[in-house]
Amino acid sequence: EELNELTPANISALEAERNDARQSLVAVQRQFVENRTRKAESVSKLREAEAKLAKLVDSAKGLRDEVLEIKAEIASAQGGLNKHREHCSYWREKLGQREAQLTEANKVVEDLEAKLRDTIQSASQIASERVEPRADIKTLDTELNGVRIRISEIEKSQSMSMEEIAARAQTHIEAYEKAKAEIKNMVIFVKQLKEAYEERLARWGQFRDSMTVRVKMQFMSHLQLRGFTGKLEFDHIKQTLVPRVQTNQDLSAAQASRTGNSGGNAGGPRQSRSMTAHQRKDTRSLSGGERSFTTICLLLSLWEAMSCPIRALDEFDVFMDSANRRIAYFMMMQSARASAGTQFLLISPLDIDVNPAKDLRVLRLRPPDRQRTLTTQQEQ
């Protein structure tokens, strides 16, 4: 009788627990369905963002190609001055528009990347990774206990605990991140160094071109003192320097050829070729004095460009006549006056007749006593 009295109470309690369990199960299933729906929405948004990002990257590449094409077109526009200015203004305006579009595209990409990060973070708060259940609770508990037992056995066999191993792993991870950041900074630094090197190389090229023009102009001005004309042919790639000189005789021959050419047209092409030959004459066809004078003009031009403090010449006037020697001394006097603090060392077996200006100082060494030297050698 006591058992029969207790039975209805226990059954009602179990039914209440069953109803609670069913309600909890329904709530969990509803939450699971909501989470799965949110995940699907997040995945679709992520794919849309990736597609937009790919399109924006392609658009950015296209814009970069267009910018390069615009720069090439600007560089090739070498027409008239007014047309060149119109083209420059037009392409600059178009380049500004493209850069503005590129900036806007970059902003859109940054916004999409930030939105993507926020979406991933929100999804990780709900579930870092969804795992499908492969067994019941008892089996999972048994496996979990087995894993704990294996972990305790590993800790006993090792000299460090799992916490120490995790701490050490975290230390190595931090060291790796630090090295990664240093490498990134080093790459940026190398890029800056490369840009600085390219800029210095471009400036050096400008300086070299300006010095080349200066040497050419100095060489032409020195030749004009003797009535010559000529030029210097620089080849910086092959590293060669070829002087071309036109003497008084070449000028007379060219004038005569020009006069003969004006009298008739029968030998026109042949006479034009002879005039071209007279205009550019190689130094190997010059006389000894002309070649020495050309060498002096070349050296003075190079010295003035390099700003040498000490300039020496040995027997430079041996093959010169009096006119070339007088002009060569005059050019060296002018160069010495233009270059304050410069010293010239001139060695010549001939008598150097120089009347320097007040701002120049000339020191002459006594000629060697060759007779005394021969007597001393014979005595020895």
Image (cartoon, grey):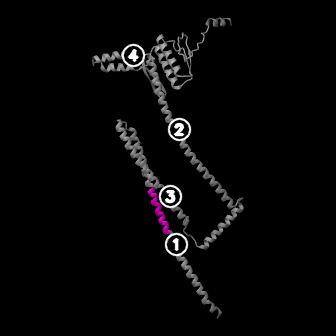
Residue 288 visible in image: no
Label 2 secondary element: helix
Q: Amino acid at mark 2?
A: Tyr
Q: Report which residue position mark 1 lands on.
A: 31
The picture places residue 88, in percent across and down from the top left corner, at: 38, 41
Q: Are marks 4 and 1 in contact (CB under 8 Å)?
A: no
Label 3 secondary element: helix
Q: Are marks 3 and 4 in contact (CB under 8 Å)?
A: no
| Among numbered discs 2 and 1, the one appearing first in the sequence | 1
Along the line of sight, which residue is nearer the eye, 327 or 67? 327
Between marks 2 and 3, how big is the CA–CA gap?
A: 36 Å
Residue 207 visible in image: yes
Residue density around tag 2, few if under 14, some if 14–19, many if 20 or more, within 10 Å:
few
Location of residue 69 with respect to 140 vertically, above or below: above
Q: Amino acid at mark 4?
A: Asp
Pick the quarter of the image with the C terminus. top right
Between marks 2 and 1, how big is the CA–CA gap?
A: 62 Å
Residue density around tag 4, few if under 14, some if 14–19, many if 20 or more, within 10 Å:
some
Single out the mark in the foreground, 4 or 1: 4
Q: Residue 267 vs residue 4: left or right?
A: left
Location of residue 136 with respect to 169 vertically, above or below: below
Q: Report which residue position mark 3 lands on.
A: 114
Q: Report which residue position mark 2 lands on.
A: 197
| Among numbered discs 1 and 3, the one appearing first in the sequence | 1
Q: Report which residue position mark 4 lands on.
A: 250
In this picture, which residue range is highlighted in magenta? 36-53
Q: Amino acid at mark 1?
A: Gln
